[in-house]
Image: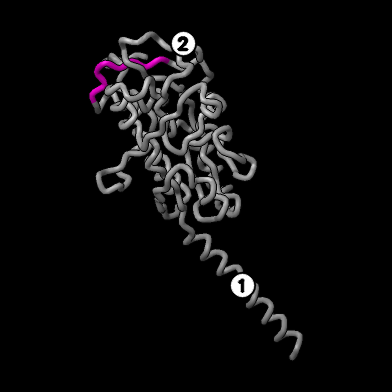
Amino acid sequence: MSLEVLMRGFALYGFLIFFNASVSAETQTIRAIVSDSNAPPYAIFNEKLQLTSGISKDILEVLAQRTQLPLQFLALPRGRVEQWLLKDQADIACFLNPDWVAQPSTLLWSGALFTTRQVLVRQDNKPAVTQIDDILGKRIGTDRGFSYPEFDAMFANKALIRDDANSLQSNLIRLQKQRVDAVLTVDLAYHYYQLHHNSEGLKADLLWTTPDAIYCAFNPNQLNLTTKMQQTLQQMIADGTIQHILQRYKPNPLSSTMAL
């Protein structure tokens, strides 16, 4: 075989590798986990458990539009999120914090999208909760699969009684029926609940802890895709897109009487 023929073969082989890689990149799909255990307005599902709206859907759709990649939603329980990312079965999951996962260094992370405040919801005829001593020994409604770093040690030693439910709505209904003493959630989720459900007899106290930053976690096995998503999300943070999306789901301060 002549040197010229051999070189043409190498050139063709190299072109095919480049072409296949380009096609793969162009047709890659963003596999996005949106857990149905995330309370509205983070994720809003219909009766058929189809994701119909919410902050997560809005953010991820803009991300897909700007990266020019198709988007696939994966409705998984919270407890399987990290496993799917690490096993290259999903590419992104949002509304996480490194403090809430077992091994945060095994995943890749976005910048902080926004912050939330935790609240303890109680019956309004009960004393305000201002410190941990106010709830010692009490039964606390929590979300199944979620981690609560400020309280996990107390749940473990039974200083507090953890009582899981599948949704914030279930927890708050149980609170109204006095089946739990308080419910742990976040400010935006509770405000949204008040807008759409009966919250008569309930009152929320801001937790004494600092606000929590909210991030997206990424699949560490797809570095090119992850880098592209990280850069795009950072642009969405910088240009105000994330805050604009959040405002769609916040109560109007001029008409709201839902101050914590």
* Amino acid identity at mark 2: Thr
Determine which of the numbered discs, if any, sits on residue 110 in the image: none
Identified at 50% across, 46% down, the residue is: 92
In the image, is residue 97 above or below residue 186?
below
x and y percentages locating residue 42 in the rendered image: 38, 35
Give the colour scheme shown.
Answer: one colour
Q: Quadrant of the N terminus?
A: bottom right
Number of numbered discs on residues: 2
Q: Quadrant of the C terminus?
A: top left
Q: Which residue is labeled 1 in the image?
A: 15
In the image, is residue 226 above or below residue 252?
below
C-alpha distance separating marks 2 and 1: 66 Å
| Residue 121 sits inside the magenta stretch | no
* Mark 2, secondary structure of its residue: loop
Residue in the foreground of this view, choosing between 142 and 187: 142
Identified at 51% across, 39% down, the residue is: 216
Furthest residue to the bottom?
1
x and y percentages locating residue 224 in the rendered image: 59, 53
Mark 2 crowd level (few <14, some 14–19, many ≥20, 10 Å Cα): few
Determine which of the numbered discs, if any, sits on residue 130 in the image: 2
Mark 1 crowd level (few <14, some 14–19, many ≥20, 10 Å Cα): few
Quarter of the image holding residue 202?
top left
Identified at 54% across, 42% down, the residue is: 217
* Amino acid identity at mark 1: Phe
x and y percentages locating residue 69 in the rendered image: 45, 54
x and y percentages locating residue 105 in the rendered image: 64, 41
* Mark 1, secondary structure of its residue: helix
In the image, is residue 174 above or below residue 58?
above
Q: Which residues are magenta?
A: 198-205
Asked whether, in this view, residue 71 is left or right of residue 220, the answer is left
Residue 62 shows in this picture: no
